[in-house]
Structures are given as structure tokens and as C-alpha cells.
Image: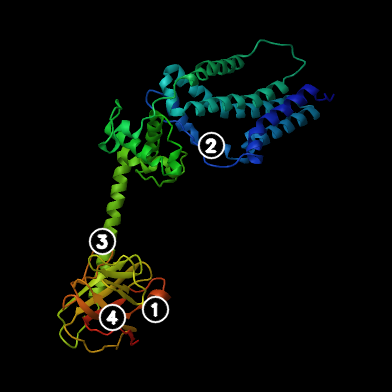
């Protein structure tokens, strides 16, 4: 005969569903999303709870990412209720209770381990609570853990057979009650303890100008804390660590170091980059030798790659035919010159506060300043500079652009220098005075029209000679 569902069971099931879904629905409807200060467990030889939780943390969160466990497991609770209710209607109440109890056990398996491990660490050594987070975070963790116990307990109560006489609690039930009681006794009062020392830059003797009153820390730990405290004033990601006690910052740094070490010291590995406390990675080399070694190795690799690239480009420029002047110059020199701001420049001592406007987008001058276009913002050019005692013959064949402009040299020393410090010799042959600068260019169209222009595409020939004319002459 069909047994109707009691009002008591309806109320218990409904309460379990609402209780589980409440926090998730609140966050979805009203909470503003944003980064929060989060602390994850840190492994430690003397704190077994840390090590165990660190081992199970990722698998647990991977499972909880399934939709069945969203909103505190509300979909699972609905599924369990349906199975239980159908079991009653088809006179398979025992099968329905098994399904419901299995769902409750699944929910308990997610919320109990963290509470148990926290309780174990607190019982072994109160200091083992520090890596789990600051007092307010640990209070929240314990509170939410206890909160999460309510829905599965309500489910177990809702599916209890009302016809059975009250019996003494089973051993698992007594064990669960003991865990909850121990958690409340060991963890919640511990939050009243002082949060710990927050050392200032002066106390840490950052930069060797402070008091240096902090004791009990190694130089690497002090350096790490100095880096964190220093950046907390100008980096929003690190600002959240400003008031966090030293021991917790160090514990989180060591945990991040452990994650990075597992990935060869790479702070850009997803496990490190996506860690809740990844904002500490900027200071991590101070604390974590594997990260420091990995970053130094990467810096060395980049230097070698850059050196190979520079050598390749210099070979490309050296392979270009050397310019043959029609009259003998006072001096001639060639170089592969680099820029990150479109131009290569010459600024005589005391001049050059303002960059001149380029004429024909090629060359610009002001007293003591010369600028020549060399790349589309960032790049290099094969540059030949020639200094003459008199006006050289005009050469336009093979050049796409040729512009002749006036230049005033206040000091008589015009040295063109690129972004890397490479320079051409002084191109003013007659000391201070009036000069003309004739700039020849080819290859600009290759830079603008091709994503990957050929090596040494841009070539410049810069001729400097005495001349009092003030006009600009565009030959090409």
C-alpha cells in the first residue's frame, strides 16, 4: 500500500534544498564579483592536515565543478529527493532511502575532510593553523564547513523510517557529532588569539636604512617580506597583503614556491599563475631559489636569443653593398642601428629637450638635434654616415627618398646614437656652425606593406657637409 510523504519530510527536504542553495543564490543575485584574499593549505612535515588537504584539494574542486554540485549541491539534493519520492510511490521505499542516503554521504564527503584536517592540526599544534589563513579567513572556513553539514544531516533525518522506534545513535553518527564538537572547541576559540606580527619596511631594514629589529627570520625571508611590503603601496594585487601577518605571508610564499618548484620554477605555469595567492609571484624569487634559477635561466635564454638576432641582422646589413662616395669623405662609418620610437637621433650636449618635427616623415632638425626615421616604431636600419668638408655630388639612383635639410651645430660634435648605445663617429667636420644634412632612404615600403619584411630592408645614407642654406630640398 502506498505510504504518503509526511509533512515533516517535506519540510526537512525543502529546508535542506534552501539551506544548500542559499549562499550560491545570494552570490549570484546580489554579491559583486571580485578578487578576494584567499589562502590555501600549505604542506608541512609537522602539520599532517596541511599535507593531506593539499593532496586532495585539487581533485575535490575538480569534482565540485560539475553542475550536479553547484549551489551547494542543490541539483544533487533535488535528484535524491526525486529518487526517494519515486521509491515510495512504487513501493520501493528502501531503494529510495538508499539513494537519498548516498547523496547525503556524498555531500558529507566534501565538507567533512577540511574540518577534520583543521581539527587534527589544531589538536597537534595551534601553530599549524597559521598557513590555513588569517583569523577572519579561518573563521569563515570553519563557519562554512559547519554550515555545509546541515543539508546532508537534514536529508538523513528526512528519510528516516518514522515507524522505527528511537534507537541509540549509531557509531558513525556519534563520530560525526564528536568531529563537530571538537571543531568548535579547538578552532573557533583560537580565532581570539593575536593575529601575529606585521613588520614594516623599517623594522625589516629594507634597503639597509631601517631599524632591523625583526629577529628569527633569514635574509631570504626578510627580502621576500620587504618586496611584498614595498609593492603593497603601488600594486593593487599586492595591497591586500599589507595587513597580513608575516608568518602567513611567508607560509603562502612557501606554498607558491612549492607549486612553482613542481613546475620547474616556472611562475607562468597554470597551477602557479591561477593560484589564489599568485599576486606574490613578483616577490617569489627572493624566497624561492628554484624560481630565481628558472628566471635567471630564462633571462639568459632571452639574452642569447637577442644576441643571435642582433648578430643575424648585423650580418644582413654587412651583406649590403658598401656605399661608394664620388668624392672622398672626411670620415665614413656604417652600423646596424636600433630604435623603439621610430627614429635614430643625435643630440649635442645641452640640447635636444624637444624632438624636431620630421620633414617628409624622414628627417627633422633643430639646433643641436637631428632625428632620422629608421623603423615603423620598433626595428632597425642599416645606416651609413659620411662627413664631408664640402658639398658632395647628388646621388639619387637606387634611393626611394632623398631629402636635404639645414642643421645648426652649436658644439661641433654631431654623433648619431641608437637605443642600444651604438653610435656613428662625429659627422661635423668643421666644428660649430651651419651644415646641411642629406638623408637617403630605401625600404620604407617593405616595412609598411609586409608583416615580416626581409632582413636589412631599411637602408639609410646620411651625408653631412658645411652649408649655410636654410631651405629644404626634396629630391625624391
Residue 261 visible to the viewer: no
Crowd class of label 1 (few under 14; some 14 to 19; many from 20; radius 10 Å): few
Crowd class of label 4 (few under 14; some 14 to 19; many from 20; radius 10 Å): many
Q: CA distance from mark 1 to mark 3?
A: 27 Å
Q: Which mark is residue 326?
A: none
Q: Quadrant of residue 158?
A: top right
Q: Which mark is residue 445?
A: 1
Q: Quadrant of the C terminus?
A: bottom left
Residue 10 visible to the viewer: yes
**Relative to 254, is 162 above or below?**
above
Q: How many marks?
A: 4
Q: Residue at x 74, y 29 (%)?
A: 14
Residue on which disc 3 sits: 307
- For marks 1 and 3, the one nearer the N-term is 3
- For marks 4 and 2, the one nearer the N-term is 2
Q: Nearer the viewer, residue 318 or 262?
A: 318
Residue on which disc 4 sits: 406
Residue on which disc 2 sits: 61
Amino acid at each position: 500500500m502506498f505510504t504518503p510523504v509526511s509533512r515533516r519530510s517535506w519540510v526537512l527536504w525543502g529546508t535542506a534544498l534552501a539551506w544548500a542553495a542559499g549562499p550560491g543564490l545570494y552570490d549570484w543575485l546580489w554579491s559583486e564579483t571580485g578578487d578576494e584574499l584567499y589562502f590555501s593549505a600549505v604542506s608541512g612535515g609537522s602539520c599532517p592536515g596541511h599535507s593531506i588537504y593539499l593532496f586532495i584539494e585539487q581533485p575535490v574542486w575538480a569534482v565540485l565543478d560539475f553542475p550536479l554540485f553547484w549551489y551547494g549541491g542543490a541539483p544533487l539534493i533535488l535528484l535524491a529527493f526525486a529518487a526517494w519520492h519515486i521509491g515510495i510511490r512504487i513501493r520501493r521505499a528502501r531503494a529510495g532511502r538508499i539513494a537519498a542516503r548516498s547523496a547525503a554521504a556524498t555531500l558529507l564527503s566534501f565538507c567533512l575532510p577540511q574540518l577534520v584536517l583543521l581539527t587534527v592540526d589544531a589538536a597537534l599544534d595551534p601553530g599549524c593553523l597559521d598557513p590555513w589563513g588569517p583569523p577572519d579567513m579561518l573563521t569563515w572556513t570553519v563557519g562554512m564547513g559547519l554550515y555545509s553539514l546541515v543539508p546532508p544531516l537534514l536529508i538523513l533525518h528526512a528519510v528516516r523510517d518514522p515507524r522505527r522506534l528511537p534507537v541509540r545513535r549509531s557509531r558513525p553518527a556519534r563520530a560525526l557529532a564528536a568531529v563537530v564538537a571538537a571543531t568548535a572547541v579547538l578552532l573557533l576559540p583560537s580565532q581570539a588569539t593575536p593575529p601575529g606580527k606585521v613588520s614594516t619596511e623599517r623594522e625589516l631594514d629594507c634597503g639597509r636604512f631601517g631599524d632591523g629589529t625583526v629577529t628569527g627570520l633569514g635574509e631570504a625571508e626578510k627580502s621576500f617580506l620587504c618586496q611584498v611590503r614595498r609593492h603593497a603601496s603601488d600594486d593593487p594585487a599586492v595591497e591586500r597583503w599589507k595587513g597580513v601577518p608575516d608568518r602567513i605571508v611567508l607560509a603562502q610564499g612557501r606554498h607558491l614556491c612549492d607549486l612553482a618548484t613542481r613546475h620547474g620554477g616556472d611562475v607562468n605555469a597554470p597551477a602557479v599563475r591561477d593560484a589564489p595567492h599568485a599576486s606574490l609571484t613578483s616577490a617569489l624569487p627572493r624566497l624561492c631559489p628554484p624560481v630565481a634559477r628558472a628566471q635567471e635561466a630564462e633571462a639568459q635564454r632571452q639574452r642569447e636569443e637577442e644576441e643571435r638576432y642582433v648578430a643575424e641582422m648585423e650580418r644582413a646589413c654587412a651583406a649590403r653593398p658598401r656605399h661608394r662616395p664620388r668624392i672622398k669623405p672626411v670620415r665614413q662609418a656604417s652600423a646596424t642601428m636600433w630604435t623603439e620610437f621610430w627614429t635614430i637621433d643625435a643630440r649635442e650636449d645641452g640640447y635636444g629637450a624637444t624632438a624636431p618635427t620630421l620633414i617628409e616623415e624622414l628627417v627633422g632638425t633643430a639646433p643641436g638635434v637631428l632625428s632620422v626615421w629608421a623603423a615603423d616604431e620598433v626595428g632597425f636600419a642599416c645606416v651609413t654616415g659620411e662627413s664631408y668638408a664640402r658639398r658632395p655630388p647628388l646621388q639619387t639612383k637606387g634611393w626611394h627618398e632623398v631629402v636635404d635639410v639645414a642643421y645648426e651645430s652649436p658644439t661641433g660634435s654631431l654623433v648619431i646614437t641608437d637605443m642600444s648605445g651604438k653610435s656613428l663617429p662625429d659627422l661635423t667636420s668643421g666644428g660649430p656652425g651651419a651644415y646641411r644634412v642629406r638623408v637617403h632612404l630605401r625600404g620604407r615600403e617593405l616595412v609598411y606593406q609586409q608583416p615580416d619584411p626581409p632582413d636589412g630592408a631599411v637602408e639609410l645614407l646620411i651625408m653631412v657637409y658645411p652649408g649655410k642654406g636654410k631651405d629644404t630640398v626634396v629630391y625624391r
